[in-house]
Amino acid sequence: MKIAERIGSEIEARIASGEWKPGYRIPFEHELVTQYGCARATVGKALTALVRAGLIERRRKAGTFVAYPHVQSAVLDIPDIGKAIAERTGSYRFDLLSSEICKEDGPSDSFASGTLLRHVTGIHQGQDGPFAFEDRLISLDSVPDARDADFSTQSPSSWLIQSVPWTQARHRISAVAATAEISTHLVIPRNTPCLQVERWTWRTGEPVTYVCQTFRGDRFDLVATFTPEGR
């Protein structure tokens, strides 16, 4: 068994046995490097696999923790949010709020430390007003063309769907209360129930984007169509 697989298996076993309970901070990467006598990249590979499996989560500047179990709902595709809003309300636009080039100072559960990123925030608007606030990171190491993309005329969601084929995606859907920032952007009272959709996409194993979209609860429906397996 390779060292990365051994590290992942032993951490997973401790979580499964209940020895490391949800919220428990696992040893820092440098501690695992010392424990297993391996390179930091090997530890990072093991932890990344556990993050993708939903067993652990990395918190910026805090460490890595055993994840709390979530009730998950399958989402079968990556929707073009602009198209969906336009079809529902008759019009759509994306209001770009901010855009900057930065580096991941992580590591995080999205990107390796030092990854060059474009950080974009904005509001998805329909005919009746704001639908969702978007906070997105795009890896410029994986998608260098995103550096110069004009998100004032096209939303990042639409641009990525048209420009970057993806091979793997992960979703996390949660009920949240509107923060002061979200309530201002979505024009709702603070603590109003909202639906938060987080999405990670990869292309042949390389991270493409992480996005957190917070929807007004009264303006969003999550719909998926299923067919019996094998049909």
Image: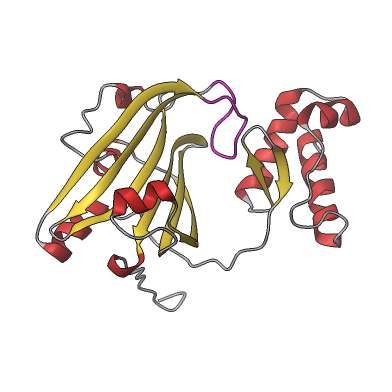
Query: Residue 161 lies in magenta, yes or no?
Result: no
Query: Residue 107 lies in magenta, yes or no?
Result: yes
Residue in the foreground of this view, choosing between 172 and 203: 172
- The quadrant of the image that shows the C terminus is bottom left
Question: In which image quadrant can residue 192 be found?
Answer: bottom left
Asked if residue 219 lies left or right of residue 100, the reply is left
Residue 119 coordinates in the image, percent (x, y): 39, 30
Residue 51 coordinates in the image, percent (x, y): 64, 46
Asked if residue 145 lies left or right of residue 23, the reply is left
- Chief secondary structure of the magenta span? loop
Name the residue rendered at 48%, 60% in the picture: 176
Image height of 106 relative to 47, above or below = above
Residue in the foreground of this view, choosing between 202 and 17: 17
Question: In which image quadrant can residue 108 be found?
Answer: top right
Residue 148 coordinates in the image, percent (x, y): 26, 22
Asked if residue 211 lies left or right of residue 60, the reply is left
Residue in the foreground of this view, choosing between 185 and 149: 185
Name the residue rendered at 52%, 37% in the picture: 205
Residue reaching furthest to the left: 90
Image height of 157 relative to 225, above or below = above
Image height of 66 relative to 174, above or below = above
Name the residue rendered at 21%, 41% in the picture: 95
Question: In which image quadrant can residue 131 be found?
Answer: bottom left
Stretch in magenta? 104-114
Colour approach in the figure? secondary structure
Asked if residue 224 lies left or right of residue 47, the reply is left
Name the residue rendered at 59%, 40% in the picture: 109
- The quadrant of the image that shows the N terminus is top right
Residue 11 coordinates in the image, percent (x, y): 81, 47
